[in-house]
Each structure stands twice: as C-alpha cells, then as structure tokens.
Image (cartoon, rainbow, N blue to C red):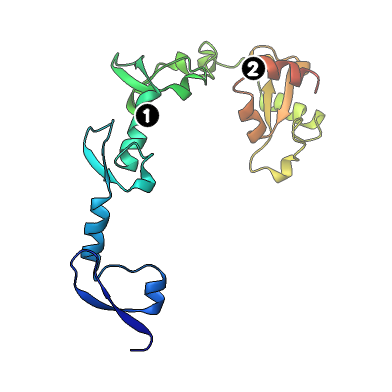
Amino acid sequence: MKDGETKSCLISGKLFYARLSLIKKGRKYCSNVCKGKAQAKNTIQKICPNCEQIFYVSPCYNNRIYCSHKCKGEAKTKKGITKRTCDVCGKLFDRIKSRDSRDYKHNYCSKKCYYKRPSSHNPRWNGGTSTLPYPFEWTETLRESIRQRDKYKCQLCGCPQQECANKLTVHHIDYHKYNLNPTNLISLCKSCHSKTGVKREFWKGALAHSV
C-alpha cells in the first residue's frame, strides 16, 4: 500500500484507504453517501418563483433562481406573453410578444383555425379574381408568341425553358386577366412566378421594366 494512505472520514469517522492520486484531488469522505451528507450541510434553501417549490443549491450556485430548466423556460415565456382573440373561433389565447413585431394582420389559436380562415385573410388574396374566367382571346397561341418573343427564357432569373420541368408561365404584369396587351405579358419560370403572388405593387414596377 505504498501508493496510498489511510484517512479518517470527516462525516462518519470511519477509517478508509485512498490512493494518493485521489487524496491530491481532495478526497475527504469514505463514500458518496458521506460526501452527499457533507454537501447537504452547506446547501442554501431557495424557493422557485415559478412553481413555488423549495429546492437546495450549493454556495457556488447561489445566483440560481429557478429549480429547473423547465421552470426557467416557463418563467421567460410568461413574461413575453400577450392575449389575442382568434379570428375564426373567437377563443382567447396566448401569443409570444416577439411575434407581434412581425406585424401579423390576423390571429389564429391553432393550425385547425388557420386552415379554416376565410380566403380574404390570405396574403395572396386579390379580391377573388382567381375565380374569374379568362377571356376567349387567352389562347395557347398567344402564350406561345410571348414565350417566343422572350426567347424562351425566364425574364427574371434567365432560366431557359428547356431546363424547366414545365413550359414557361405567361404572367399578367398588372394582374388583370383581360389585359392581353403584349406589353402586359411576360414569361416567367414556375419558381419566379410563385414570387409574384405577394408584394404585387413591387412586382408591377419591377416587371414593367423587363418587357
């Protein structure tokens, strides 16, 4: 037993053998049970402000406020909660304040209500014009002539039609189906055409200079 020595436990008083490497690290107790009892003597009692339960911390963690990460998260959430009324079912629900900064125009308490929302709440809503029929002059021959004029390339990203999965879409710049003036029509790929569903005023100006 040259690599260790016998010590007396500070809690139970029992003699125990410990290696020198553990003694250098500060071993003072015969077992983890005694070590736990020693630590319990030095703990500080605190009350969690979220769940109001009593918990104990060691002196080095005296700045700890909550008993668990769960309570810490719940407390932060409560501070940033606002009350909102669902536009579909009328139910009062909680929403995080950070989402209010995104300037939401409508409020929904759940995905179920979100999918039940009226069409007019959709940011792509344009007064129901999508349900109106196209004029008789809106033919494939007309659309093909616009694609040919634009050299079969998307006028936004420049992607050629042969590299697209589908034919180029012929888009109405002013969003009016009955305006079939060639200067109001432009060829777009499917990806770029999907972008024009929002911020319509911006796209009106941007695409007008592309024809």
**Residue at position x 75%, y 14% in the image:** 181
> Where the C terminus falls, by quadrant?
top right
Q: Which mark is residue 16?
A: none
Residue 54 found in image quarter = top left
- Farthest residue in the bottom direction? 1
Which labelled disc corresponds to residue 77?
1
**Residue under the point 74% across and 16% down:** 205
Q: Which one is in front, 4 or 67?
A: 4
Q: State the residue at coordinates (28%, 30%).
A: 49
Q: CA distance from mark 2 to mark 1?
A: 36 Å
Quarter residue 25 falls in: bottom left
Percent position of residue 16, x then y: 24, 77
Question: Percent from the top left, x then y, of residue 35?
Answer: 26, 62
Query: Label 2, on which residue?
Result: 200
User: Type of residue at label 1?
Assistant: Thr
Label 2 sits on what residue type?
Arg
